[in-house]
Image (cartoon, rainbow, N blue to C red):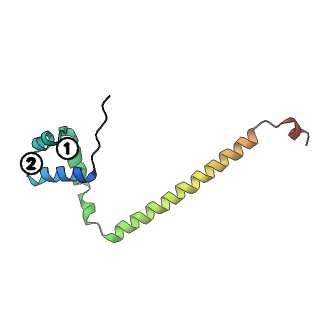
Amino acid sequence: MTKRRTFTPEFKAQVVLEVISGAKSAAEACRQHSLKPQLLADWKAHFLAHASKAFQSEEQRSQEQARIAELERLVGRLTLELEVSKKVSSILNSPLSKSERWS
């Protein structure tokens, strides 16, 4: 079983920019880096789809980061509530021992 290679975002951007700028053809880039053409096409499509984020204002990014932090706090709180609910449920549904039944 072969281990899958992983590529850094910087590497992906570098290869895509080489192809987009015309410095290399897609076939040349694929041969040089031992990539499948479909993988490079996927990277290129993702790069182009998200290119507008490079020009996003700092205010928009900070609002997004604040929203992410808020959602992470909510997930943490809900996870804690779920754990407490499970613990209470297991206690209430457990059979009572003989000493607890007569109390």
Q: Residue at x 18, y 50 (%)?
A: 16
Mark 1: give few (<14), some (14-19) or many (20+) Cα within 10 Å. few
Of callouts 2 and 1, which one flags the residue occurring earlier in the amino acid sequence? 2
Q: Is residue 26 above or below residue 20?
A: above
Q: Residue 35 at what x, y percent from top left?
A: 19, 39
Q: Residue furthest right?
A: 102
Q: Residue at x 74, y 43 (%)?
A: 91
Residue of label 1? 41
**Quadrant in the picture for the N terminus:** top left
Q: Quadrant of residue 97?
A: top right
Say what amino acid the circle numbered 1 marks: Ala
Q: Decide which of 69, 5 is in the foreground and name it.
A: 5
Give the label, 2 or 1, closer to the camera.
Answer: 2
**Quadrant in the picture for the C terminus:** top right
Q: Residue furthest bottom?
A: 59
Q: Is residue 41 above or below residue 76?
A: above
Q: Residue at x 22, y 51 (%)?
A: 11
Q: Is residue 4 above or below residue 88?
A: above
Residue of label 2? 24
Q: Decide which of 29, 64 is in the foreground and name it.
A: 29
Q: Residue 70 at what x, y percent from top left?
A: 49, 62
Q: Decide which of 87, 60 is in the foreground and name it.
A: 87
Q: Secondary structure at mark 2?
A: loop
Callout 2–callout 1 Cβ contact below 8 Å = no
Q: Residue 86 at what x, y percent from top left?
A: 66, 45
C-alpha span from label 2 to label 1 = 14 Å
Label number found at residue 14: none
Say what amino acid the circle numbered 2 marks: Lys
